[in-house]
Image: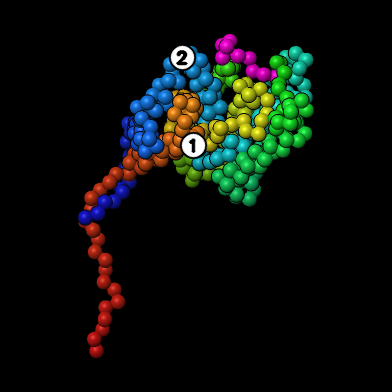
Amino acid sequence: MQLRLEHRPEPLQAMLWLSPLIAVVLAVIGAAIIFRLLGRDPVTCLQVLFIDPLSELYSLTELALKATPLLLCAIGIAIGCRANVWNIGAEGQFTIGAICGAGVALAFGGDDRWWVLPLMLLASVAGGLAWAGIAAFLRTKFNAHEILTTLMLTYVAIQLLGWLVHGPWQDPDGFNFPQTRQFAADATLPLLIEGTRVNIGALIAVAAVPLGSLLLGRTLAGFRIRVVGLAPGAARYAGFSEKGTVWFCLLLSGGMAGLAGICEAAGPIGQLQPIISPGYGFAAIIVAFLGRLHPVGILFASLLMALLYLGGEGLQMSQQLPLAATGVIQGMLLFFLLGTDVFVQFRLRLVPARKMPVTGAVRHG
């Protein structure tokens, strides 16, 4: 007897939404095992990771702050994934968006001009959009897969940021630290709650949830995205342009990632530094799939991932664990999610082992 995976006639609809919860539970169990192997008390570590960040108002605002870029990037990624357009380079578009918005802040900020901040937001969207447009052009013109091109462009963007903060944009009064000067007051996002760091970027991110749902569920563009992703042959028969869908999805995803970039640079950081993201663009891929590629699900998934970031910082301070521990938990979360998804689409069957046919019989003469 042997085990075999057989495709289900219809996926289990309830499991489509239960499998992320199962993946979270399995990731928590895996994290507890890792904490024990590292010589730490699992209960204490899990409390620091999941409970302590929710215990105070300031921690809750920090949760919203970290969820903002994750939510914006993940919704853009999810819309593309619905059409089988895989944007893996949101981190690079995030970086370019921050650079473009910062360029406006450094050039025009400081004179109490009301239009500086809106122009920064537009510039960041345009920057992320243009960076994703490179991958769209390569895909539609030369059939270069966007997984590779968006990923490689990410490292180009990071190197460009490093060159700017070490070179032409470096703060002359910054004691040779690789950073730009601080953005002026008219070039920073207004705070929502005084005494905290949460800003109107959180409102922009929350507004993206109903807008994304409206796009996917109530517009012709969303219908075209779903058809191209589910039935490419039917989409061609209906006259839907595959190239046009690739352009639309990548530009939208890049623009949203670029907007997330300036929300971070003009928000809690207030300047450009060599590192402006702890990996939000990559973590947003996990968030998108954990949220089942739906904006509402992504909202809750982004809060969970933000909780992991906050808890990871707490583990560094209270338990002296490396930041890589958070990355391991994120990786387990994705691993278990993919594993549970297998059983949504397939089922295990115990079948008799096949006997190998006998070949090459020896002839006796």
**The quarter of the displayed image where residue 243 is located:** top right
Dividing the image into 4 quarters, which one contains the N terminus? Answer: bottom left
Q: Position of residue 15 (x, y in %)?
A: 33, 33
Which residue of the protein is positioned furthest toward the top in this rendering? 194
Residue position marked by numbered label 1 in the rendering? 324
Q: CA distance from mark 2 to mark 1?
A: 25 Å
- Number of other residues with Cα within 10 Å of mark 2, as a class: few under 14, some 14 to 19, many 20 or more: few
| Lower position in the chain sequence, tag 2 or tag 1 | 2
Number of labelled discs? 2
Q: Is residue 121 visible?
A: no
Identify the amino acid type marked 2: Glu
Residue position marked by numbered label 2 in the rendering? 56
Q: Position of residue 202 (x, y in %)?
A: 55, 19
Residue 192 on the magenta segment: yes
335 on left or right of 80 = left
Dividing the image into 4 quarters, which one contains the C terminus? Answer: bottom left
Q: Secondary structure at mark 2?
A: loop
In the displayed structure, 218 sits above or below 332; it is above
In this view, the residue in front, 233 or 266, is: 266
Specify start and end residues of the magenta stretch as a single range.
187-196
Residue at x-position 48% and y-position 17%: 60
- Number of other residues with Cα within 10 Å of mark 1, as a class: few under 14, some 14 to 19, many 20 or more: few
Residue at x-position 24% and y-position 64%: 355
**The quarter of the displayed image where residue 169 is located:** top right
In this view, the residue in front, 38 or 14, is: 38
Q: Is residue 365 visible?
A: yes
Residue 237 on the magenta segment: no
In the displayed structure, 362 sits above or below 136; it is below
In this view, the residue in front, 149 or 320, is: 320
Q: Secondary structure of the magenta portion, mostly?
A: loop
Residue at x-position 50% and y-position 41%: 84
In this view, the residue in front, 222 or 264, is: 264
